């Protein structure tokens, strides 16, 4: 198997893993319930699927949250940029700076949210810090860029494809990586706004903070097979058609 084919397989896997959660709500719109159920079920083991932290299309939420969407957007972006030779090799420890923003954003949000949850899983009051879908996507994408960049280089090295070396300045590299993140997120929110009538973004970037007032752990409220209680976070009976 040629090196380019090996890398293209990797690129295909990343593209598929990124695309399926976005296709799930489109399948619901089309009435294709079974494939939508399969996607939501599979991705429920990788993501909390809270509706308030997810991007929507046609009034249905993606099969994963805004942060996971950003992570895999970043991984896919760097897989493409490395494939066409616009990003050079990096050492593994350069992943660390890309992790810090997401760790701080997600960490503080989790800690302060826990302080405001009652024993029944109801959010009481307003936590000191809650991130928005914009910050979740951007910090997730930064992590995805760091991890994906290193992963893509490893695959390219294993496939024995020569790594091109373009003499871009660090500022141009920053633009090459950062611009698609912000443009991509803006495009996703605009599609959300145009296609949805009920579950719409709160502003042009869905930058406003959303705090659920019901059961905080409710999943897929804007998807399929929503959870009804904390004791059943998967709702297999619905996915398997038993109710």
Image (cartoon, rainbow, N blue to C red):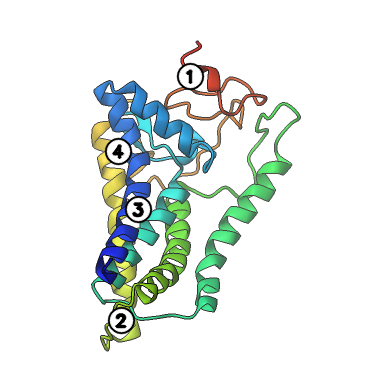
Q: Residue 163 got which mark?
A: 2
The structure residue drawn at horizontal position 27% and vertical position 83%, both measured from the top left corner, is 164
Q: Is residue 234 above or below residue 153?
A: above
Identify residue for label 3: 13
Q: Is label 1 in contact with label 2 (beta carbons under 8 Å)?
A: no
The structure residue drawn at horizontal position 56% and vertical position 67%, both measured from the top left corner, is 100
Q: Residue 190 got which mark?
A: none
The location of residue 61, given as percent across then percent down, is 39, 34
The location of residue 56, given as percent across then percent down, is 36, 36
**In front: label 4 or label 2:** 2
Bin the neighbour count of mark 4 within 10 Å (Cα to Cα): few under 14, some 14-19, many 20 and up: many
Between the C-alphas of marks 4 and 3, the distance is 25 Å
Of residues 168 and 52, the one drawn nearer to the viewer in this rendering: 168
The tag earlier along the polypeptide, 3 or 1, is 3
- The quadrant in which residue 105 appears is bottom right
Bin the neighbour count of mark 2 within 10 Å (Cα to Cα): few under 14, some 14-19, many 20 and up: some
Identify residue for label 4: 192
The tag earlier along the polypeptide, 1 or 2, is 2
Between the C-alphas of marks 3 and 1, the distance is 26 Å
> Disc 2 on helix, strand or loop?
loop
Between the C-alphas of marks 3 and 2, the distance is 21 Å
Q: Is label 4 in contact with label 2 (beta carbons under 8 Å)?
A: no
The location of residue 36, given as percent across then percent down, is 36, 28
- The quadrant in which residue 170 appears is bottom left
Between the C-alphas of marks 1 and 4, the distance is 29 Å
> Disc 4 on helix, strand or loop?
helix
Query: Taking 113 as reference, is 50 left or right?
Result: left
Of residues 169 and 202, the one drawn nearer to the viewer in this rendering: 169
Q: Is label 3 in contact with label 2 (beta carbons under 8 Å)?
A: no
**In front: label 1 or label 4:** 1
Bin the neighbour count of mark 1 within 10 Å (Cα to Cα): few under 14, some 14-19, many 20 and up: few
The location of residue 230, given as percent across then percent down, is 65, 26
């Amino acid at each position: 198997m040629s090196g380019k084919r090996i890398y293209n397989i990797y690129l295909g896997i990343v593209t598929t893993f990124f695309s399926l959660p976005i296709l799930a709500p489109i399948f619901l719109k089309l009435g294709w319930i079974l494939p939508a159920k399969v996607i939501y079920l599979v991705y429920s083991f990788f993501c909390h699927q809270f509706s308030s932290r997810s991007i929507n299309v046609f009034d249905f939420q993606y099969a994963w949250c805004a942060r996971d969407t950003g992570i895999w957007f970043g991984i896919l972006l760097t897989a493409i940029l490395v494939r066409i030779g616009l990003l050079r090799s990096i050492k593994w420890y350069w992943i660390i700076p890309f992790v810090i923003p997401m760790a701080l954003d997600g960490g503080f949000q989790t800690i302060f949210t826990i302080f405001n949850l009652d024993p029944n899983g109801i959010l009481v009051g307003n936590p000191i810090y809650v991130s928005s879908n914009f910050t979740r996507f951007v910090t997730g994408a930064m992590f995805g860029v760091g991890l994906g960049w290193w992963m893509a280089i490893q695959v390219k090295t294993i496939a024995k494809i020569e790594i091109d070396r373009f003499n871009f300045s660090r500022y141009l590299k920053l633009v090459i990586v950062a611009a698609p993140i912000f443009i991509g997120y803006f495009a996703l929110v605009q599609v959300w706004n145009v296609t949805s009538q009920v579950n719409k973004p709160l502003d042009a970037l869905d930058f406003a903070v959303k705090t659920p007032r019901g059961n905080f752990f409710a999943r897929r409220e804007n998807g399929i097979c929503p959870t009804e209680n904390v004791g059943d976070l998967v709702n297999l009976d619905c996915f398997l058609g038993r109710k």
